[in-house]
Amino acid sequence: MKFYLKLVHMEVHRFRYLFGGLMALTILVQFGVVLLWSLRERSIRTGPGWSEQSVTYHPFSETGKLTFNELMFSNQFWFSFPVLISVAVIAGYVFLIWYRDWLGRDTFIYRLLMLPSNRSSIYAAKLTAIVLFTFGLVSFQLLLLPLEMMLFNLVIPEALRDPSYLSQAILQNQALKVLIPGQFDAFVMAYAIGILTVLAAFTVILLERSYRVIGIGFAVIYVFVCGAALLAPITLQRPGNTASYLYPGETYAIILALTAILVLVSVWLSIRLLNKKITV
């Protein structure tokens, strides 16, 4: 356990600058958008010639006043941009977290493998680090949203705005709606598949490291099998398919069970490759 915790600390320490950069990018972009959009809308609505009759249709407020929901909807790109950048960086780091140890100047992975401890700790530490980075950024985004709403309320006078709720505001942005699902079952499914994707990527990397060129072929087959297994229940549920007798809840349970099985297979195969096939 002590060795595992040291490895987790090492992986988190390695990623600290990238993690801090992603947090800073999110703050700058999202707070900048909130401030600029709010100032512009306040200027328009307090300027000459504006009246409540100027609003002919307003989907976010019956009174035609401003809401935080409207801000979120009107700035899809700028709220999504730091989220998508963060997703892309973590997706790339899933591969870098392994290949950096192998392809670095000191081939650090061989020093790790020669230590008198269970190699599964290396695997577990890298997985833990990726999960911590992911949920850390999600938590940070959840922390920012109330602060952004406070900034919106400070800039927009009470007479010009209607109350908004964070749960509704999140639904107005496509990226945040995926990142922070509104329903518990959707949250479990989204992040279960996300963790499976990370584990499958780890397996692909270890197959390539174990068998080199042939391992790439094994990796392609493995990814195809995982994808086919998850898509099969969804394909059976497509409209017009009379061969399906499953209710949506049953389809959800089957996909979740398949995900759990694939997670166990991925972990077992990866640790076996790390212990039996990768030599120093």
Image (cartoon, rainbow, N blue to C red):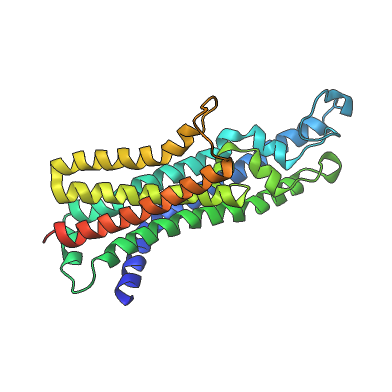
Instruction: Name above or below for residue 261 compared with residue 214.
Output: below
Q: Is residue 41 visible?
A: yes
Q: Residue drawn at (18%, 44%), measured in percent from left and top?
A: 215
Task: Residue 267 in the image: state x and y as whole percent.
Answer: 31, 57
Task: Residue 18 in the image: state x and y as whole percent.
Answer: 40, 52
Give whichever of 112, 191 is nearer the camera. Answer: 191
Q: Is residue 194 visible?
A: no
Q: Residue drawn at (66%, 32%), measured in percent from left and top?
A: 74
Tell me the quarter of the image containing the N terminus. bottom left
Does residue 245 appear to the left or right of 61 in the view shown? Answer: left
Tell me the quarter of the image containing the C terminus. bottom left
Task: Residue 100 in the image: state x and y as whole percent.
Answer: 24, 53
Q: Residue drawn at (49%, 56%), measured in percent from left and top?
A: 135
Q: Residue drawn at (44%, 44%), measured in percent from left and top?
A: 87
**In which image quadrant can residue 72 be found?**
top right
Q: Residue furthest left?
A: 280
Give whichever of 216, 138 is nearer the camera. Answer: 216
Give whichever of 172, 14 is nearer the camera. Answer: 172
Does residue 190 appear to the left or right of 172 in the view shown? Answer: left
Does residue 14 appear to the left or right of 23 in the view shown? Answer: left
Does residue 211 appear to the left or right of 78 in the view shown? Answer: left
Q: How many marks?
A: 0
Task: Residue 224 in the image: state x and y as whole percent.
Answer: 31, 37
Q: Residue furthest bottom?
A: 2
Give whichever of 85, 203 is nearer the camera. Answer: 203
